[in-house]
Amino acid sequence: LKIKTKITIVVLLSLVCFLATSTYIISGLFQTKASAAKSIELIADIIDQNDFVHEFQKERAGSISIVNGNGNVANLSKQRSVVDEKLNKLKDKGDLASKLAVFRAKVNARDATNIFDDSRAIVQSSFVLSNEYAKGFDATLQDDFRRVLAISQIKENIGFLRAIMASIYTKRSITPQEHLKIIVVDGTTASYVGNFFDFNDPRYSEEFKSQLVMSPEFRLIDRVMKNVIAHPNESVNELEPDYWVAQMTILVDNFKKFETKLIDELKGHAIKM
């Protein structure tokens, strides 16, 4: 072959290789952007689920007060409207609407049968939906989501203990079933807290400790749980229900702020993909 022909062949081969490489790179970029866009959409769905849970936790506290005979019906009605608004915003409701209807029917009838378990089932159903969304995340976002879920689980346990202890302080008595529920929930809370310290970067665990675990409200719940587990019958007169609810509401709201911060970071990582 002539030198000119050889040069032409080499140039053409180089051009083909360049085009193939460019196509591969561009395709990868499009896939990454598509994955990021999908993750951002799923994060928005998780935010909606978490907002629903937060408002329902408030409804639960007010509902337990109603069942115990010392709640405010007008306030509960307003909170139910807020919860309904959050529920209607959800892309996927699963069985949330039906479980919520069962819970509310019992509250309206002042029927305390399994009411705490019913409330937990609603929250756990929402968590299941969030977990399903997270399966669609890019792999690099999974640790971020697990952090969020851990805080959400601790927050739910505190919300549950807020409600059940308010009931106990109101009636000044505790049943063996309530005592067992408290032992189980307190145990899982300790496990979630320990895991957060063990499996997260120090910058997260230190912030978690300083802002939440070392707060007066967290120390209060820790002390109350130790007391009620060790001395259930004596502990029922320890606090006034309104004081307990107020302190635990501060703690739940602080956990919500931390949860929101972690979700914002998760979203930021998705945007940067």
Image (cartoon, rainbow, N blue to C red):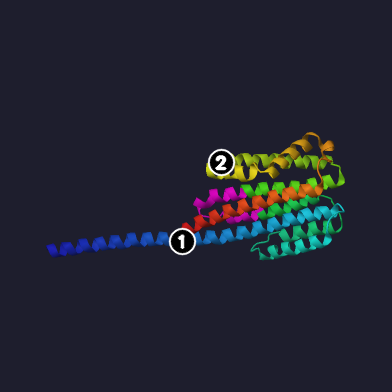
For mark 1, does the 10 Å Cα neighbourhood hold few (<14), some (14 to 19), or many (20 or more) residues? some
Q: Is residue 141 above or below residue 15?
A: above
The residue identified by callout 1 is: 33
Residue drawn at (83%, 60%) of the image: 73
- Magenta span: 127-149
3 to the left or right of 218? left
163 to the left or right of 128? right
Q: Please, what is the dominant secondary structure of the magenta stretch?
A: helix
Q: What element does badge 1 sit on? A: helix
Percent position (x, y) of residue 180? 78, 40
Judging depth in this view, the residue of 106 and 17 nearest the camera is 106
Residue drawn at (73%, 40%) of the image: 184
Percent position (x, y) of residue 54? 69, 56
Percent position (x, y) of residue 63? 80, 55
Circle on res. 199: 2
181 to the left or right of 6? right
Question: Residue 126 is drawn in which quadrant?
Answer: bottom right
Q: What element does badge 2 sit on? A: loop
Residue drawn at (78%, 48%) of the image: 243
Amino acid type, label 1: Lys
The answer to the question of whether label 2 and label 1 lie on touching residues, with beta carbons closer than 8 A, is no
Q: Quadrant of the N terminus?
A: bottom left
Amino acid type, label 2: Phe
Judging depth in this view, the residue of 194 and 98 nearest the camera is 194
Indicate whether residue 230 is drawn in magenta: no
- Mark closest to the chain's N terminus, 2 or 1: 1
Indicate whether residue 140 is drawn in magenta: yes
